Amino acid sequence: MSVFTAEWLKVRSVRSTYLIIGLSLSAILLGLGLAVMAAGMYDSAPPDKRPSARIADLEEVVVIVPQLCTGILGALAITSEYVTGLIRMSLTVVPRRWPLLAAKAAVVGTLGAVVGPAAVFGTYLVSRWVLGGRFSGAYATSLLDKLPLLTATSLTVPAFALLGLGLGVILRSAAGAITVIVGLVYVVPIIIGNIPEPWSERVGSIMIGALPRQITGDGNASSVYGSLLSPAASAAVLIAYAALPLLAATWLLRRRDA
């Protein structure tokens, strides 16, 4: 418990943590702005065009903001210690090493588990408030009906936080870890949309952005992602995104010098 407390004090004592959390929650404002813009476009469209108008789920669009931010937070939680040399003191106090990484994972994972639902559910609620019954009632369904998908989408945020932490240990570089995270969020989906089938569907199905709708069985028919995995397999892949980098990080942390 003392190791967790120490890591929590480290994270909350730096300004970057509050900046990253603030940027993560700004996704709600981004979703609000998109919803207002979409409502204006819908209201100004000719009446005969409105029944065919469609809109993406805005919470799935803006979730990339907290994903990226918490991934960076996870990376900085460890790489900042390598840069300053504090890692030597930390490993002297906690010589077994793995409890140190476990405590960091608990801290950044908890922050991701709080920020993720706040951003996703907050975006959904403001979008529902603004859009109402527009776009053929895309936001008129009950919250209970949307709860599984919103929850699955929220879980990708702590997964990114743990992924960032694992990459930070493996690469010992904030820039390197952030580059990989940005690639997963922005670059790889673009590449997927331009590779031939069946590889586009296969690779697209295991991307982290494809997993929430596969976990809930909704599919990804209107996106670049694939839908080949079962709900159980999709959940396992989401866990693997967080667990495998941490396992590799634990192995390397026990064998490399600080």
Image (cartoon, rainbow, N blue to C red):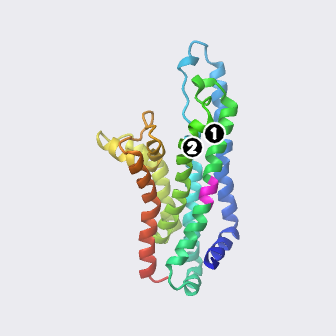
Q: Residue at x 66, y 73 (%)?
A: 10
Circle nearer the N terminus (1, 2): 1
Relative placement, left or right, of 63 versus 195 is right
* Secondary-structure class at tag 1: helix
On screen, residue 153 above or below 159:
above
258, above or below 39, in the image: below
Label for residue 150? 2
Residue holding disc 1:
124
Q: Is residue 224 left or right of residue 44?
A: left
| Spatial CA span between label 1 and label 2 | 8 Å
**Magenta region:** 111-115
Q: Residue furthest top?
A: 48
Q: How many marks?
A: 2
Assess whether residue 219 is covered by the magenta stretch.
Answer: no
Q: Whole-percent x and y of residue 251?
A: 41, 75
Which amino acid type corresponds to the residue marked 1 in the rendered image? Tyr
Tag 2 secondary structure: helix
Q: Which mark is residue 94?
A: none
Circles 1 and 2, Cβ within 8 Å, touching? The answer is yes
| Residue shown at 34% from the left, 41% from the top | 201
Q: Nearer the viewer, mark 1 or mark 2?
A: 2
Q: Residues within 10 Å of mark 2 (few under 14, many from 20)?
A: many
Residue at the image position 66 percent from the left and 20 percent from the top: 43
Q: Position of residue 37 (x, y in %)?
A: 65, 31
Counting from the top left corner in percent of width and height, residue 217 is at 44, 40
Residue type at mark 2 is: Leu
Main SS of residues in magenta: helix
